[in-house]
Image: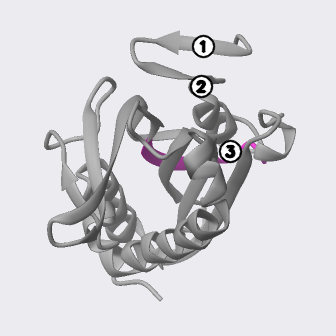
């Protein structure tokens, strides 16, 4: 992967890096310099039904909606799909446009210990007008023992000076949204 990838209006370092972090151990990933990164994994349920519910909720944007975001997007997360989420209240919303850069329908893949795990999810990158530059990924995982996990991966930095000046507020907002995504994953699975 090149240090600078460009595809249409997507213009940030390491396009698709969150997919690489899903396929390999995130500990082996060199995150872009100057970008903050998040890698949070949360147990949300047990069994195939819980995994199916989480995967469906991720791929249909329900995780964003249940986290309190207003979402305008095609019905399903597929490569090239553009989505605009809105932060705020009523008509006072900050639009955050993104484009899906990778998507994975439910499938079994070799896990780090050689036993198969089931994965589904997608990653989207920021488009012009987004307050950040970077990528975020939402992943449903089922381990061989049936444990179901929600994983959120992201790397980002402010998109410009005005957003850089508001970075402390942005970081608090991001932390709150991450907690909302985690709670949404729990409600999707009926999990703990």
Q: Is residue 34 magenta?
A: no
Q: Is residue 114 magenta?
A: yes
> Foreground: 9 or 100?
9
Which residue lies under the disc numbered 1? 5
**Does the CB distance between marks 1 and 2 fall below 8 Å?**
yes
The spot of residue 144 in percent (x, y) is: 60, 59
Q: In the picture, which quadrant includes the N terminus? A: top right
Provide the major secondary structure of the magenta segment.
strand
User: Residue at position x 30%, y 23% from top?
Assistant: 80
Q: Earlier in the sequence, mark 1 or mark 3?
A: 1
Which residue lies under the disc numbered 3? 111
Classify mark 2: residues with Cα within 10 Å, few (<14), some (14-19) or many (20+). many
Which residue lies under the disc numbered 2? 12
Q: Dividing the picture into quarters, in which one does residue 41 lie? A: bottom right
Secondary structure at badge 2 equals strand
Q: Which residues are the magenta region?
A: 113-122
Tell me: 141 left or right of 84: right
The spot of residue 2 in percent (x, y) is: 71, 10
Tell me: 4 left or right of 76: right
């Amino acid at each position: 992967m090149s240090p600078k990838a460009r595809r249409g209006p997507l213009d940030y370092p390491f396009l698709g890096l969150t997919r690489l972090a899903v396929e390999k151990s995130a500990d082996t990933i060199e995150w872009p310099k100057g970008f903050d990164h998040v890698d949070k994994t949360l147990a949300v349920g047990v069994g195939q039904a819980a995994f199916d519910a989480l995967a469906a909720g991720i791929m249909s944007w329900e995780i964003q909606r249940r986290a309190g975001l207003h979402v305008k997007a095609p019905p399903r997360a597929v490569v090239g799909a553009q989505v605009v989420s809105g932060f705020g209240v009523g008509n006072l919303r900050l639009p955050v446009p993104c484009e899906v850069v990778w998507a994975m329908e439910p499938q079994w893949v070799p896990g780090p210990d050689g036993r198969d795990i089931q994965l589904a999810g997608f990653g989207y990158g920021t488009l012009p007008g987004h307050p950040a530059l970077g990528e975020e990924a939402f992943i449903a995982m089922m381990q061989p023992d049936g444990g179901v996990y929600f994983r959120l991966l992201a790397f980002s930095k402010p998109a410009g000076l005005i957003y850089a000046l508001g970075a402390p507020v942005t970081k608090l907002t991001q932390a709150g949204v991450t907690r909302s995504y985690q709670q949404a994953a729990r409600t999707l699975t009926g999990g703990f």
